[in-house]
Image: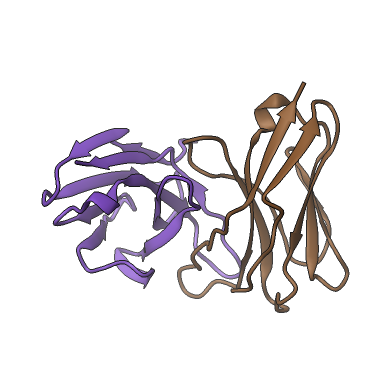
Chain colours: A brown, B purple
Amino acid sequence: DAKTTQPPSMDCAEGRAANLPCNHSTISGNEYVYWYRQIHSQGPQYIIHGLKNNETNEMASLIITEDRKSSTLILPHATLRDTAVYYCIVRGLMNQAGTALIFGKGTTLSVSS
Amino acid sequence: ETGVTQSPTHLIKTRGQQVTLRCSSQSGHNTVSWYQQALGQGPQFIFQYYREEENGRGNFPPRFSGLQFPNYSSELNVNALELDDSALYLCASSLSGPGTDTQYFGPGTRLTVL
């Protein structure tokens, strides 16, 4: 699976949009971009994933560049509860039983009032 | 719909002992993956079970073993515990099929080895 690069930390004011970047310049054509977050001492929480097109769900939006070498996770109106470590993960297509998630160090997002 | 559950929540063992951690998959899921998360680090893949067989393993010694049952629940067993085994153990369940799957995590079991 391709490696990812994320900034170690970011700050965001409550109510503003949080834009978390991820670089995955070695991504191959059949690899997906996944985002998870982990609030202190809890299990990681799935946020969103995408292949080529931009994706949006009730939690966030995922913007993938046309060359697929980078992406941005957008939390449109950050709240204090969005303070967490955010992981960007690149995964290949499943074999018979899926592929492991390879976690990096992630980005620690701190949302303040 | 019931999410992924793990038991126990916390556990304290001494070096050399054995431990069994349990995971119940989310309804409808057929695959369970286990991860170890040391303090301050991201989760590391231990192994994955699909249809009751191990299918993929990370860089962990054989004293880490597991089982998956017909109802897709799973156990993680660790023998001869070492101090470095102290960590948060996470299981994640998913529905495997063509394309990509999404893994959903449980709350974890905090293991302390003294």
Decide: is A51 above or below B23: below
Q: Residue furthest right?
A: A66
Q: Quadrant of residue A67?
A: bottom right
Decide: is B93 above or below B59: above
Viewer-side residue, A48 vs A41:
A41
The image shows residue A53 at horizontal and vertical percentages of 83, 62
Viewer-side residue, B7 vs B81:
B81
Q: Relative to A98, is A27 on the left or the right? A: right
Viewer-side residue, A101 vs A7:
A7
Q: Residue furthest left?
A: B16
The image shows residue B60 at horizontal and vertical percentages of 31, 66
Q: Residue at x 44, y 59 (%)?
A: B44
The image shows residue B20 at horizontal and vertical percentages of 20, 47
Q: What quarter of the picture does the N terminus of chain A occupy?
A: bottom right
The image shows residue A48 at horizontal and vertical percentages of 69, 50
Q: Relative to B13, is A40 on the left or the right? A: right
Q: Residue at x 32, y 68 (%)?
A: B54
